[in-house]
Image (cartoon, helix red, strand yellow):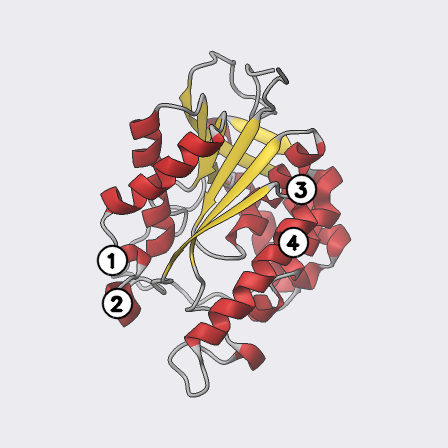
Amino acid sequence: MAERSLTLMAVHAHPDDEATSTGGILARYAAEGVTTVLVTCTDGRCGDGPGGVKPGDDGHDPQAVVAMRQAELVASCEALKVTHLETLDYADSGMMGWATNDAPGAFWNTPVAEAADRLAELIRRYRPDVVVTYDENGFYGHPDHIQAHRITMAAVERTGIPAKVYWTTVPQSAFQEFGKVMQEIGVEFPEPDAADEMPALGLPDDEITTWVDTRAQGGQKFASLAAHASQAENIFFLRLGEERFTELMGMETFVRVRDSTGAPTPEDDLFAGLR
């Protein structure tokens, strides 16, 4: 009987989310013979439409956006050599506070238990050794990212299958460099409203448990991001070019929140203790 390969499952909210924080690990571990599973929870209907038309504006056709973004997601997975793509197809909820948060079928509006049951079925089918998703704030407060976190942790608890669970993060030491680069390419972010207090993004470097070098996969990661061409206006990193992008985004970082291996941290491999 053939030995089962190690399996990585990444749970993301929208088409294109897989590229930025986990494109490197999906490509790296696929190249190492690990079975990679991407679960995308929503259909991306609140993204830009053809020609950059915004949701809610005249000419924005949610169903056309869904079809376009599904095709882009498939192309992204091809670039990363993802073994299995699973889509839960909940309606994209849009940004926090949008009317779409409460629309019928919206991911944010779906009971956690219901969506967790569906994800638990996938975990039982694929039996991932490692699961990766967002932290409890969805990294930056997007409702669909928060919901992806909630259903993932609930499904992991129900199944007890993954040996290790990680949340994506960014070292706070990197934000200064990110800021410089964004200025160089002319990206300006609005000042946050004092009334909308958000948790600090990322973690202090010494709280990050896992640093995975994916520079060798920089070209694949860039191609994955570029596959989502319809959202290019919002994907600032594409403006860097592949070489600069790889320098800036070639280390993917995580915090380990579940572990049955006893592997010491900090670690440089999500599968430390499993091989």
Q: Is residue 39 visible?
A: yes
Residue tagged by mark 2?
Answer: 103
- Who comes first in sequence, dot 1 or dot 3? 1
The image's mark for residue 224 is 4
Please identify, in this view, whether the residue under mark 1 or under mark 3 is nearer the observer: 1
Q: Is residue 86 left or right of residue 5?
A: left
Q: Compared to 161, does 242 lie above or below?
A: below
Give the mark, 2 or 3, whose residue is nearer the N terminus. 2
Q: Which mark is residue 250?
A: 3
For disc 1, the marked residue is 109
Kind of residue at disc 2: Ala
User: The disc labelled 1 sits on which kind of residue?
Assistant: Asn
Q: Position of residue 180 (x, y in %)?
A: 61, 56
Does 244 sit above or below residue 210? below
Dot 4, how many residues are within 10 Å of its Cα: few (below 14), some (14-19), or many (20+)?
many
Residue 37 located left or right of residue 102: right
For the C terminus, the quadrant is top right
Number of numbered callouts drawn: 4
Circle 1: element type: helix
Asked if labels 1 and 2 touch by Cβ distance under 8 angstroms, the answer is yes
Q: CA distance from mark 2 to mark 1?
A: 7 Å
Q: Whole-percent x and y of residue 182?
A: 60, 60
Residue 25, located in which quarter of the rendered image? top right
Amino acid type, callout 3:
Gly
Q: Residue furthest top?
A: 262
Q: Which circle's residue, 4 or 2, is located before the other in the chain? A: 2
Give the SS element for disc 4.
Answer: helix
